[in-house]
Image (spheres, grey):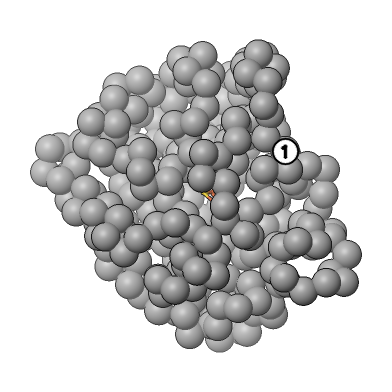
Amino acid sequence: MMLGAWCREDRLGRRLVVILQGLPCAWGKCRFCPFAMEQGVRLGEVIERNRGIIREAERLIDGCGAQRVSIFNGSSFYELPYETVSRLRRLTEGRVVDIESRPEYLTLETLEATLEALGAELLVVRVGVEVWDDRLRNDYLGKGISREEIERLSRLRLEARDRGLPVQLVAYVLFGIEGIPEEKVVESVRELNRRFDGVIAVRYHRYADWMPAEAPVSSRLKELLEREALLVDWGEEPDWIIAGRSPGSSKPSRGP
Ligand code: SF4
């Protein structure tokens, strides 16, 4: 993703988007994921770069008038260096804060500790479930997220609520990718809307020849997503420039 910070206004309201450099995702096996192309591996450089991005975000946030801050790092939030996390509070305190995480990092204790560290008014954790169908999710996409894990998150969301924690869990659903038929996208939105606090639909883009092809999106699906999802991310924002490449900029000469 294009590293940096900028203001945005969309269906989620006026918000500051902060894209930090991450360390490589510990899972790293999803076959549609371009993030490994840009992850830093030198801890010192990642820390230094993130300090600069956070300084830039601090400069922007008041002018932005944003009550919401979305923090992304191309892997789980919990894989950011502690040094980086420890600098975020001035941006996040008293605001709605979006972060992303794989399920394995999420427990009542980590959610509680994150709320405390960030001082967030509401913590929204986005989890890349991508597709409800187990075979497509794990055999085809390589997500490594079992049905049990999804059900555990669904219960965790209720337990957090019972404990009075201001936490929401939101699922990403991937669409427009070869190999996932539209009815499976519709099923995913339906099933995940029931178990999470909502769904964010993400339009797949191919950045490299080794990635699956893009698939066309029907107007019927488009309408359903606009209606049923909290947000439809068409991947056209500057955040989606990955390792210097725009969406769809690979030569689509080869299939998956
Ligand atoms: S879990 Fe997320 S960051 Fe990690 S490989 Fe899969 S899509 Fe990429």
Residue 11's x, y, as percent?
51, 55
Q: Is residue 158 above or below residue 180?
A: above
Closer-to-camera residue (131/230): 131
Residue 165's x, y, as percent?
21, 36
- Camera sees residue 59: no
Q: Is residue 130 above or below residue 54?
A: below
76 sits left or right of 115 in the view: right
Residue 255, quarter of the rendered image: bottom right
Residue 119's x, y, as percent?
34, 22
Closer-to-camera residue (63/210): 210
31 sits left or right of 161 in the view: right
Closer-to-camera residue (180/227): 180
Q: Secondary structure at mark 1?
A: loop
- Report which residue position mark 1 lands on: 38
Q: Amino acid at mark 1?
A: Glu
Q: Is residue 200 above or below residue 74?
A: below
